Amino acid sequence: MDIAMEEARAAAIRGEVPVGAALAGPDGRLLARAGNRVEAWHDPSAHAEMQVMREATRLRGGARLADCTLYVTLEPCPMCAAAAIHFRMGRIVFGAYDPKGGGVEHGPRLFAHPRCLHRPETVGGVREREAGALLRDFFRRLRA
């Protein structure tokens, strides 16, 4: 989660919503890291989670991540949660909960849907206060 937090802080400096992600392989080795790049790339799918899942499968030469762990500073949105299902992500550890835009514990709760193709293990609230403060401070400064 340290790396994901570093990526979130770097994203904020770039003017992106401060969300960072890191993806570790089965041995705990870092496979990919990223922060949001939605604004820089003019790409609404350039969320940190999407970037690291794509990079990890590219590096591994396969489309499945069932033995990997995704660390992300914010509860994945419905798009990223759906992608995690298709990437067959093994485990997701996230920081702040997102009652407004989340897709795991809030909103559509995709992993709880009876027809969900794959259900990653999820752990939420890891460093929640720190991740939430980063987001609140970013939006406070943006509004000022």
Image: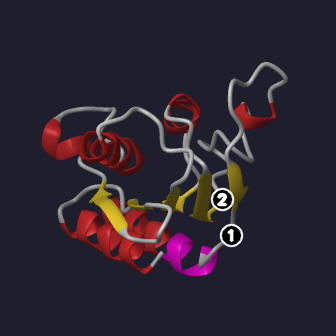
Residue shown at 14% from the left, 45% from the top: 40
Say if 110 sits above or below 74 in the image: above
Q: In this view, does 67 lie to the left or right of 97?
A: left
Badge 2 density bin: few <14, some 14–19, many ≥20, Cα 10 Å: many
Does the residue at mark 2 contact the one at mark 1 (Cβ under 8 Å)? yes
Circle 1 sits on which residue?
A: 125
Image position, residue 81 (x, y; %): 57, 38
Protein image colouring: secondary structure
Of all residues, the one furthest to the top in this rendering is 115
Q: Point out the stretch of residues depicted in magenta.
A: 128-133
Q: What element carries label 2?
A: loop
Residue shown at 44% from the left, 60% from the top: 25
Q: Nearer the viewer, mark 2 or mark 1?
A: 1
The reply to whether residue 144 is in sight is no
What is the magenta segment's predominant secondary structure? helix
Residue type marked 1: Gly
Q: In this view, does 140 lie to the left or right of 41?
A: right
Q: In which quarter of the image is residue 140?
A: bottom left
Q: In this view, does 41 lie to the left or right of 37?
A: left
Mark number for residue 97? 2
Residue in the foreground of this view, choosing between 43 and 26: 26
Residue in the foreground of this view, choosing between 37 and 86: 86
Q: In which quarter of the image is the C terminus?
A: bottom left
Say if 9 sits above or below 100 in the image: below
Q: What element carries label 1?
A: loop
Q: In the rendered structure, does residue 93 fall within the stretch colored magenta?
A: no
Image position, residue 89 (x, y; %): 55, 44
Residue in the foreground of this view, choosing between 77 and 57: 57
